[in-house]
């Protein structure tokens, strides 16, 4: 079976962009501001849920599509709408992206309440359990994201390009552009006086081992920004998969984010690029293998998760003392 | 006058620290039987680091530490303890969630099962105030009592060397004096004591010999009398009240 | 409408579940106190115990009296293997608490998906232990099976045994000492390395028992342990990381979760799937308002 290189690389590029944005988000939170977020997937999923909901609702209105937004029929109708109404679809896309980031930011702000009061390990526990509970909760509440069936019909804004390859390529370009933009914006921020203040908080905490001297306001700000970025990543991901399913937002996504920043060196955004690339390559190869080898896809994704976990353990174990020490 | 007995611990050219940080540079000192040797110096001079090196809690960059004929450097902490070297850290030196009796039992780990109870009883004789409260949680003890417990724990294993890191730190003068006098009792029982103290005046009163450490290097050593005649030492530690100091040997 | 029969059934069930939460919480507490880390792979110890019990009783026709100890052994083996291969080396390298937590997350994923692969290949993505649990009696019309005789006494006996071990034996006291201050323990001449291994064995044994029981209680999937992490942590933290407290917390959470969910469902129509939110709320409330949980002790920094 011939491998469609364009689609393969296009897919990998999209994953790279999505992963990069996620990694940058975690790097900001932990690498620079010292907040261990073990619930990253929660904020990521918010972007997905928000996008899904908005797309479904807005297109129902704009495209005059009645009926249950969670049904396959309306999903198909939404896909058709996107093909024939590029302008409308772009409007929906932009609104969804912006709202996703806002919602991410809001929850990031809410998360700052425990973040200020709890010490690092309890914060990590809280966020991790929040993510677990959230997955559970959304799965049980069909109204949010289609429960156990998920929500389909979240078309790419490039659907109007009838050439599938071109559509993927264009979307990849968009995601990469956004990723690169965020990268540079964050680098700018971190080299500014504000950024230096962040780093001093981080280093201070590492030495002081207590939350006493840190400004709650700055923590909240960092959480808001980082969560908005994570939600953006989730939104961009959803527009690529065209489908959202609460059960897919597992621990593994959080682990992905951590692997990426650990791979490149925590606090080092350039390292995040490397991490994102490796993970994207791994995912694409896995997807390819699923197509080529005749193993059920879930078996391969289990194996992929094991590989990623093993890699993380190896990195943590083989790092020289304090390898995961913050970058600059 | 105190007789200088056999050398029991000999440290030569010891350099040690944490990771890449060298704190102590090329320091030599020795400890004799039935002696209290005092290591004194200002804050940050490396006193604690140096004695930690004896029990293998620190990174060593060079030198030798001989316990009798056995080289201690490179040996695991547990093995060193079992050889008969006991170490009482300055802080966090008791198990707060265990009772006094249980704290002492922890010190008895290195003994044969038959000797454990006997050793604990013997220590209770030395420290009757601990026996009175032996079922109490160690948490409930006052600062002075904690120090006593910490030292008592270190004695259970019948050590030949007892290393004390600032046992009187943070204690009221009267209590500090009590602790110091207990230490002389311990020395009189035949245990050699390596004492690190900031409270130089009180400690010099009971020490047999002293070593002065400044910024990781040895500045001076000698008997308490010799040290009090050393102008640098006096200036650094003994303040103006030279007359307050009465070395043991001249009493 | 609150029905007496349903309420009784829910309360009884809460005691079953509470027992298992107590076991999970107590073993987690021991691992936190003894190894000074938060082990996110704790759930997998229970999952391994659950699957061993389920597979041995279902496919090998083994009696539960043999399968359960084997399950406990398997979980203990996993606990030690993970510590020796991952956690201990990290501690030796001076890894931070967050790095070790991260490693435990990776271990959790690795083991969980390894079980997934096995379970998928053996077509046992969901399975239950095949143990006879005849009905013994009935309270207000609610059947009480022998499962109650298995689980509740075993949980109480296990915790009692653990407490006795920790307070009356020298090794147990050494473990408590190590939990207080590992370096002081070493300096007292205690072989901390061997002691740590023993801690993990005990942790695995108890968590494995909890898992085996769960497999008898309900259908399990490779995610069962992970799903139980919230309750495990809740029991441990609400219990203030003490053993007595954790047992009590386990039962409180079992009751709050199940009876609470039932009551909310009958009075306000809240779907029962949200019961985990009750547990979560309790946990968050405790973390923020009274981190020392049910105890009066100050929570030590790890």
Image: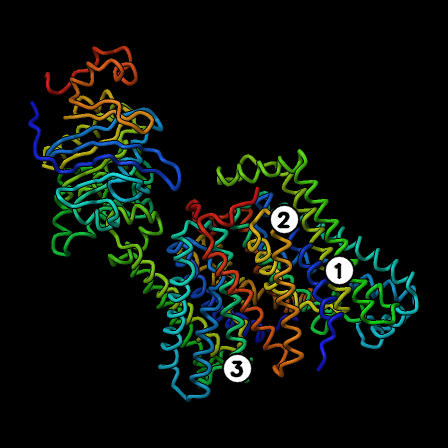
Q: Are marks 1 and 2 on the same chain?
A: yes
Measured along the vertical axis of the image, is residue C270 above or below residue B82? below
Q: Is residue A277 left or right of residue B51?
A: right
Measured along the vertical axis of the image, is residue A272 above or below residue B174? below
For mark 2, what is the residue?
A: A269
In the rendered image, the quadrant that contains the C terminus of chain B is top left
For mark 1, what is the residue?
A: A236
Q: Which of the 4 image quadrants contains residue B3?
A: top left
Measured along the vertical axis of the image, is residue B180 above or below residue A227? above
Q: Measure how far apart labels 1 and 2 are at the Cα level.
A: 20 Å
Labels 2 and 3 touching (C-beta < 8 A): no
Secondary structure beneath label 1: helix
Q: Measure how far apart labels 1 and 3 are at the Cα level.
A: 38 Å
Secondary structure beneath label 2: helix
For mark 3, what is the residue?
A: C127
Q: Do labels 2 and 3 share a chain?
A: no
């Amino acid at each position: 079976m011939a491998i469609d290189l364009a689609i393969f690389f296009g897919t990998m590029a999209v994953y790279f962009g999505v992963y990069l944005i996620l990694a940058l988000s975690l790097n900001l939170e932990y690498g620079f501001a010292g907040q261990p977020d073990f619930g990253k997937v929660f904020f990521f999923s918010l972007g997905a849920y928000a996008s899904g909901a908005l797309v479904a609702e807005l297109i129902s209105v704009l495209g005059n599509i009645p009926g249950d937004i969670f049904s396959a029929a309306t999903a198909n109708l939404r896909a058709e709408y996107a093909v024939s109404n590029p302008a409308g679809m772009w409007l929906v896309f932009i609104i969804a992206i912006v709202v996703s980031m806002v919602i991410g930011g809001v929850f990031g702000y809410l998360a700052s309440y425990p973040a200020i009061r709890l010490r690092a390990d309890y914060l990590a526990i809280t966020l991790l359990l929040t993510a677990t509970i959230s997955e559970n909760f959304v799965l049980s509440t069909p109204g949010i994201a289609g429960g156990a069936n998920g929500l389909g019909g979240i078309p790419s804004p490039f659907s109007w390009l009838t050439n599938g390859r071109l559509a993927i390529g264009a979307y990849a370009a968009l995601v990469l552009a956004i990723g690169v933009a965020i990268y540079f914006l964050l680098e700018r921020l971190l080299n500014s006086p504000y950024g230096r203040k962040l780093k001093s908080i981080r280093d201070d905490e590492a030495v002081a081992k207590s939350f006493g001297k840190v400004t709650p306001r700055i923590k909240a700000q960092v959480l808001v920004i980082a969560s908005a970025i994570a939600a953006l990543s989730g939104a961009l991901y959803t527009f690529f998969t065209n489908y959202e399913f609460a059960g897919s937002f597992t621990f593994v996504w959080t682990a992905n984010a951590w692997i990426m920043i650990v791979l490149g060196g925590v606090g080092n955004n350039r390292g995040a690029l490397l991490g994102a690339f490796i993970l994207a390559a791994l995912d694409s190869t896995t997807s390819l293998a699923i197509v080529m080898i005749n193993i059920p896809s879930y078996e391969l994704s289990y194996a992929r998760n094991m590989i990623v976990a093993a890699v993380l353990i190896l990195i943590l174990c083989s790092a020289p003392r304090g390898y995961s020490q913050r970058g600059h | 006058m105190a007789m200088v007995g056999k050398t029991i611990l000999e440290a030569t050219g010891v350099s040690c620290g944490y990771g890449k940080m060298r704190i102590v540079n090329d320091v030599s000192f020795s400890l004799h039987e039935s002696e209290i040797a005092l290591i004194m110096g200002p804050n940050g001079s490396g006193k604690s680091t140096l004695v930690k090196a004896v029990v293998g809690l620190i990174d060593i960059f060079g030198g030798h530490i001989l316990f009798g004929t056995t080289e201690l450097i490179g040996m695991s902490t547990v093995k060193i303890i079992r050889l008969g070297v006991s170490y009482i850290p300055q802080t966090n030196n008791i198990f707060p969630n265990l009772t006094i009796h249980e704290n002492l039992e922890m010190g008895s780990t290195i003994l044969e099962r038959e000797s454990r109870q006997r050793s604990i009883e013997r220590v209770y004789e030395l420290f009757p105030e601990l026996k009175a409260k032996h079922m109490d949680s160690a948490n409930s003890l006052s600062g002075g009592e904690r120090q006593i417990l910490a030292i008592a724990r270190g004695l259970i294993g019948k050590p030949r060397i007892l290393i004390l890191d600032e046992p009187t730190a943070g204690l009221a003068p009267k209590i500090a004096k009590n602790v110091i006098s207990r230490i002389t009792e311990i020395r009189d029982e035949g245990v050699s004591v390596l004492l690190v103290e900031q409270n130089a005046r009180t400690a010099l009163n009971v020490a047999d010999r002293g070593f002065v450490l400044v910024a990781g290097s040895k500045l001076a050593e000698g008997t308490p009398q010799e040290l009090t005649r050393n102008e640098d030492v006096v200036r650094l530690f003994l303040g103006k009240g030279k007359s307050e100091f009465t070395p043991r040997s001249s009493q | 409408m609150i029905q007496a029969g349903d309420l009784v059934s829910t309360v009884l069930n809460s005691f079953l579940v509470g027992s298992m939460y107590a076991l999970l919480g107590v073993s987690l507490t021991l691992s936190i106190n003894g190894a000074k880390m938060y082990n996110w792979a704790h759930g997998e110890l229970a999952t391994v115990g659950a699957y061993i019990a389920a597979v041995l009783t279902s496919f090998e026709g083994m009696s539960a009296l043999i399968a359960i100890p084997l399950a406990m052994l398997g979980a203990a083996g996993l606990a030690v293997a993970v510590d020796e291969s991952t956690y201990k080396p990290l501690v030796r390298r001076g890894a931070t608490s967050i790095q070790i937590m991260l490693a435990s997350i990776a271990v959790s994923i690795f083991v969980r998906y390894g079980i997934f692969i096995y379970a998928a290949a053996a077509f046992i993505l969901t399975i239950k232990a095949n143990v006879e649990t005849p009905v013994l009696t009935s309270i207000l019309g609610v059947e009480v099976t022998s499962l109650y005789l298995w689980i509740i006494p075993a949980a109480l006996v296990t915790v009692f045994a653990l407490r006795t071990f920790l307070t009356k034996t020298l090794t147990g006291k050494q473990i408590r000492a190590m939990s207080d201050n590992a370096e002081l323990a070493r300096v007292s001449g205690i072989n901390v390395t061997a002691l740590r291994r023993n801690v993990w064995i005990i942790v695995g044994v108890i968590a494995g028992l909890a898992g085996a029981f769960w497999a008898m209680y309900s259908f399990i999937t490779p995610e069962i342990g992970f799903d139980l992490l919230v309750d495990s942590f809740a029991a441990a933290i609400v219990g203030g990381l003490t053993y007595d407290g954790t047992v009590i917390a386990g039962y409180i959470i079992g009751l709050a979760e199940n009876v609470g969910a039932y009551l909310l469902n009958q009075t306000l129509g809240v779907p029962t799937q949200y019961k985990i939110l009750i547990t979560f709320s309790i946990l968050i409330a405790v973390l923020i308002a009274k981190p020392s949980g049910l105890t009066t002790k100050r929570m030590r920094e790890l």
